[in-house]
Image (cartoon, rainbow, N blue to C red):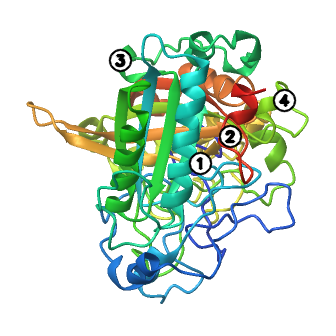
Amino acid sequence: MTDQSTPGTSSDTAGESRRGTTAAPGASAVPPARAASPEPTAPAGMSRRRLLGTAGATGLALGAAGAAAGYAAAPSGDPSAPLASVGTDAVMFHGKHQPGITTALQARGHLVAFDLVAGAGRREAAALLRRWSATAERLMAGEPSEHGDTDVARDAGPSSLTLTFGFGHSFFTRTGLQKQRPVALDPLPDFSSDHLDKRRSDGDLWVQIGANDALVAFHALRAIQKDAGAAARVRWQMNGFNRSPGATASPMTARNLMGQIDGTRNPKPADADFGRRVLVPATGDPAWMANGSYAVVRRIRMLLDDWEKLSGTAQEDVIGRKKSSGAPLSGGTETTPMDLDKTDAEGNLVVPINAHARISRPDQNGGAAMLRRPFSFHDGIDSDGVPDAGLLFVCWQADPLRGFVPVQRKLDRGDALSEYIRHEASGLFAVPGGAERGEYVGQRLLEG
C-alpha cells in the first residue's frame, strides 16, 4: 500500500487501477498509439475450447473479499456484462513488452522461482526458455500445452492468462553470462524491516502467472513446472488472489486485506513519463533488456491481529487516508491531491508526519515511482490462531536503484505502517522485452 509507488501496502499504489476506464482485464489500458505498447487482445477467431469457455468459465478464482491490488473489477467496459465473458478475454503472448506488466491485474496469481540444476548452463537454459515460451503462447491463446496436457483447464477459455519470465542475479553466473548482467540487477541492500527467509527469496529464473480463473492459472503453473524437466527445479512458489472481475457493481479501486483502498496513485500507462519510469528504453543497456523492466518481488505479511485492534481513526492516521473512500485526510475525494501542509485548529498536521501515504509519495522521494501489481495471499492460520496473510508485492520499474530502493529506505526510517507489516521474502529479476513471432523470451540474451 502506498502513495503511487511504494513497497508497503497502502491506499496509493496498485498496478493499473482502471478506475474510469473501459479496458478489459486482459487488455492494457494504454491506447495503441502510445509508446507503452499494450498487449493487444487476441483475434476474433475462437477455438472450440475458447467457445466453450464463454459458457463454462464462470468458476472465477477466489471471490476475494478484500483483494490487495487497486484494480477495477468489471470484466469489460460494460459493468452489466455476464461473468461468463471473462473466460473469452485473451492477451497476446508476442509483443514489444512481455504480458503481465501493463496487463490489468488478474483474479488469481502464482509466483514461482527456479534454480538451474547442477551442470545445466546456457544451452539448457535456452532450451528451457524455448519450451516455456511455446507453452505460454499456446495457453494464453486458450489452447492445451503441446505435450502431456493435464486437461485441468479443458472447459475454460484463456481467462486473461499471462505468463511473464525473468532472470535473477545468479542466473548469469550459472550460464557464464556475467558480462551481460545489468548493473540494475545488483542485489538489493538490506533494510531494517527485513525478516527474510532466504529459502523463499531470489532464484535463477522467475515466472509470474496471472489469470481470471483459478484452474486456468493452476494449469499454467503445472505446465511450466513440467516443462522445467531436468533443467531446473523449483526454489519457491507463492499463490495470490485479487478481486474477481464483476465483483463490484462498477469499476472501482479495490481494497487490500487491511480494508484500505489500495491503488489510487499508481503510475498509469497514459502518463507522459510512464515509459521512462517503468520500462527500459529501446536503447537501453544492456541491449538485450530493451523494452523490458525490472521486477521487485516481496512477500509482505500483514500483522492483521495487531492492525485490527486499532480504531478506524487510528488506522486512517497510519495510512493518511479515509478508510471509507480513500480520500486524503486533508479533504476531497480519492483523487484529490494531498495537502501535506494542512493543519487542524490546534496546529497539528492533518496528515501525520509518519503517515504511509505522506512518506511514500513520489514528490517526497525525488520522483521515484514504480508500477505496483501485487496479489493478496492467505496461507492458512498458524497454530496460535494468527492468519498468515498479506501482500505478494510485485513492482515494475526501469531501474530499481531509482525506483524501489530509495522509497523503501525512506519507509524504513519512519513509516507508521511498518509496525503492522513484515517483509519475509525478497527477489529482484530482470524481465526482458517481449518475444517477437518466431522468438522465445530471452533469446537475445542467450543467443546474442
Q: Say what amino acid the circle numbered 1 marks.
A: Thr
Residue 209 image position (x, y, % from top left) = 47, 48
- Which disc is residue 287 wearing? 4
**Viewport quadrant of the C terminus:** top right
Q: Which is nearer the N-term, disc 1 or disc 2?
A: 1
What's the distance in space between the residues labelled 2 and 3, CA to CA? 26 Å
Q: Most extreme residue toward the left, as rendered?
A: 383
Q: Which SS class for mark 3? A: helix
Q: Say what amino acid the circle numbered 4 marks.
A: Ala
Q: Which SS class for mark 1? A: loop
Query: Along the horizontal axis of the image, is 304 left or right of 10?
Result: left
Say whether marks 1 and 2 touch (CB < 8 Å).
yes
- Which disc is residue 370 wearing? 2
- Which disc is residue 396 wearing? none
Q: Most extreme residue toward the right, as rendered?
A: 283
Residue beneath disc 1: 13
What's the distance in space between the residues labelled 1 and 2, CA to CA? 9 Å
- Which disc is residue 199 wearing? 3
